[in-house]
């Protein structure tokens, strides 16, 4: 296996791994929203329904785009913003163990945004 193949497989693993794990946080929010329950935190002051809607987009739609490698760098940006809000606004006063997951996702999606999708993606770059 040459370096290019290893690199592209690494990008695929990064995209699918982080994207799929983010879905485990977003799908319950999507189901909550679809059931008609719009109660949610409002960390940036735009209202609970809007905050929930944006969280669902950032934790379901955009990770799906990252997983398939479509507009990957752009799709990672809303997830990055959401993780910044989760780690440094929602959990600002909490100990590190409470914000650790959001920071790990933040690091992973920043790496995805910087590196792009790679060869094994819809974008194929």
Image (cartoon, helix red, strand yellow):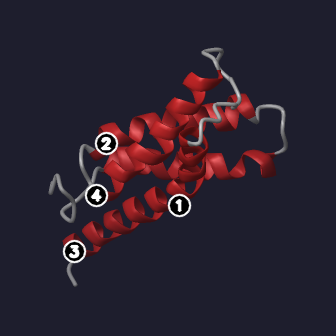
Q: Which of disc 1 and disc 2 is earlier in sequence? A: 1
C-alpha separation, residue under disc 2 versus residue under disc 1:
18 Å
Q: Residue at x 53, y 60 (%)?
A: 21
Tell which residue pokes out farthest to the top in this image.
45
Work out which quarter of the rendered image holds the N terminus and state it: bottom left
C-alpha separation, residue under disc 4 versus residue under disc 2:
12 Å
Q: Which of disc 4 and disc 1 is earlier in sequence? A: 1
Q: Secondary structure at mark 4?
A: helix
Work out which quarter of the rendered image holds the C terminus and state it: bottom left
Q: Residues within 10 Å of mark 1 (few under 14, many from 20)?
A: some
Q: Secondary structure at mark 1?
A: helix
Task: Provide the residue designation for mark 2.
Answer: 73
Disc nearest the viewer among 3 and 4: 4
- Residue 74 has which mark? none
Tell which residue pokes out farthest to the left in this image.
124
**Residue 67: horizontal and vertical position, in percent?**
34, 58
**Tag 1 near tag 3, CB within 8 Å:** no
Q: Is residue 84 above or below residue 71?
A: above
**Residue 88: horizontal and vertical position, in percent?**
69, 32
Task: Provide the residue designation for mark 3.
Answer: 5
Q: Residue at x 68, y 38 (%)?
A: 87
Q: Secondary structure at mark 2?
A: helix
- Residue 21 has which mark? 1
Disc nearest the viewer among 4 and 2: 4
**Residue 96: horizontal and vertical position, in percent?**
79, 47
Q: Which of disc 2 and disc 4 is earlier in sequence? A: 4
Instruction: Please tell me which residue lies in front, 13 or 31.
Output: 31
Q: Residue at x 28, y 50 (%)?
A: 116
**Tag 4 near tag 2, CB within 8 Å:** no
**Tag 2 near tag 1, CB within 8 Å:** no
């Amino acid at each position: 296996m040459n370096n290019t193949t290893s690199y592209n497989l690494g990008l695929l693993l990064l995209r699918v791994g982080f994207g799929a794990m983010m879905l485990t946080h977003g799908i319950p929010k999507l189901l909550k929203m679809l059931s008609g329950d719009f109660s949610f935190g409002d960390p940036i002051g735009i209202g609970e329904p809007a905050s929930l809607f944006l969280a669902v987009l950032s934790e379901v739609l955009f990770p799906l785009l990252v997983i398939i490698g479509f507009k990957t760098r752009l799709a990672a940006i809303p997830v990055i913003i959401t993780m910044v809000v989760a780690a440094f606004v929602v959990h600002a006063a909490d100990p590190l163990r409470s914000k650790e997951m959001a920071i790990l996702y933040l690091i992973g999606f920043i790496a995805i945004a910087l590196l792009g999708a790679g060869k094994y993606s819809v974008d194929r770059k």
